[in-house]
Image: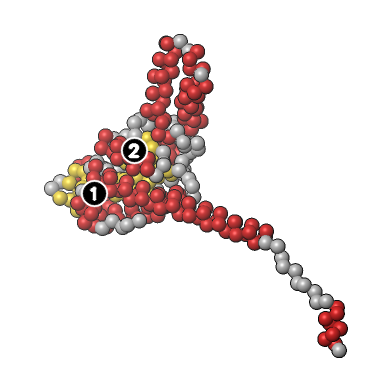
Amino acid sequence: MSKLNFETLLEAGVHFGHLKRKWNPAMAPYIFEEKKGIHIIDLNKTIVHLEQACAAMKQIAKSGKKVLFVATKKQAKEIVSERVSKVNMPFVTERWTGGMLTNFQTTRKSIRKMATIDKMKSDGSWETLNKREKLFKTRQREKLEKTFGSIADMTRQPAAIFIVDILKEHIALAEARRLNIPTFAMVDTNSNPKLVDFPIPANDDATKSISLILDQICNAIQEGLEDRKNLKEKDKEDSSKEVAVEATPAVEETPEAPAAEEKAAE
C-alpha cells in the first residue's frame, strides 16, 4: 500500500473541519489550529491513524472475514458502493435498518425472501401466480434489493464495520459497539473519536477527502485478499509436493550374487 503524503491530503481538503462552535471537545488532540472560525485537522495525526486502520483492515481481509461499510450520506454513497464492490465487501448506502446487526436473524430472513422470489422465477412457479401477486412480489423484491441487496452475501455478522460520519450513522455505530464489533470511521471535528476503535481524523463531508481515505482502506483490503490467495496457493503446492514424495516408490538395493562373493574371496 502506497503511503499518503501530507501534500496529497492537503489537496483533497482532508484537513478542513467544522466551525469552531460545532466542535466536539474530544477531538482536541486531532486539531492543529483554528483558522477563520474553522478548525483545521492535524494531518500528521491523520496519516498515523490511517496507517493503523489500513494495517488492521489488511489483517481482517487476510483472515477471510468481512468488513461492512456504512455511508448513507449523499456525498459518500456512490464513492463507497463503487470502491467497496471492487473488493467484494458488503455495504449499506441507502438506509440503515434498525436491528440490521443486533437482530441479524431477521436481516437474514429478508435476504432469504429475495432468494425465494428469484427461485420462483427460475423453477416455473412464478407463472402460476396471478397478475396482482406477481406485481406484489416484484415490488417486494425491489424494496428488499434496495435495502439488503448489497449485503446479500453477508452470511454472518461482520468482523468489523467502517463508517463515514458517525453522527449520521449513529444507530449503526451503537449496534456495532453493543455487539463488540471493531469499528473504523472517518471522524470530523464535530464527532467523538472515543466512540470508535480506529478513528481516522478527516473531513467526512468533501467527496475528495472521502474518496482518498476509502481508496487507502480498500487498497489495504485488496492486499490482504491477495496475501490470502497467495498463502492458499503456496499451501496447495506444498501439499502436492508432499503427496508426490509419498507416492514415489523406494529404490531397493540389488543384493550381490553369491557367486561374485566367492570369486572375490579366491
Where disc 2 sits, the SS reads: helix
* Quadrant that contains the C terminus: bottom right
* Quadrant that contains the N terminus: bottom left
Mark 2 against mark 1, which lies toward the viewer?
2
Rendering coords of residue 42 (x, y %): 24, 54
The residue that label 2 is drawn on is: 81
Which amino acid lies under the numbered mark 1 shown in the image of this protein?
Val
What crowding class fits label 1: few (fewer than 14 Cα within 10 Å), some (14-19), or many (20 or more)?
many
What crowding class fits label 2: few (fewer than 14 Cα within 10 Å), some (14-19), or many (20 or more)?
some
Of residue 261 and residue 198, the one placed in the foreground of this image is 261
Of residue 64 and residue 160, the one placed in the foreground of this image is 64
Rendered image quadrant of residue 251: bottom right
For the residues marked 2 and 1, what is the alpha-carbon distance in whole angstroms? 20 Å
Q: Is residue 140 above or below residue 171?
A: above
Q: On the rendered structure, is 29 left or right of 151?
A: left
The residue shown at (33%, 50%) is: 216
The disc placed on residue 69 is none
Which amino acid lies under the numbered mark 2 shown in the image of this protein?
Ser
Of residue 75 and residue 97, the one placed in the foreground of this image is 75
Circle nearer the N terminus (2, 1): 1
The disc placed on residue 14 is 1
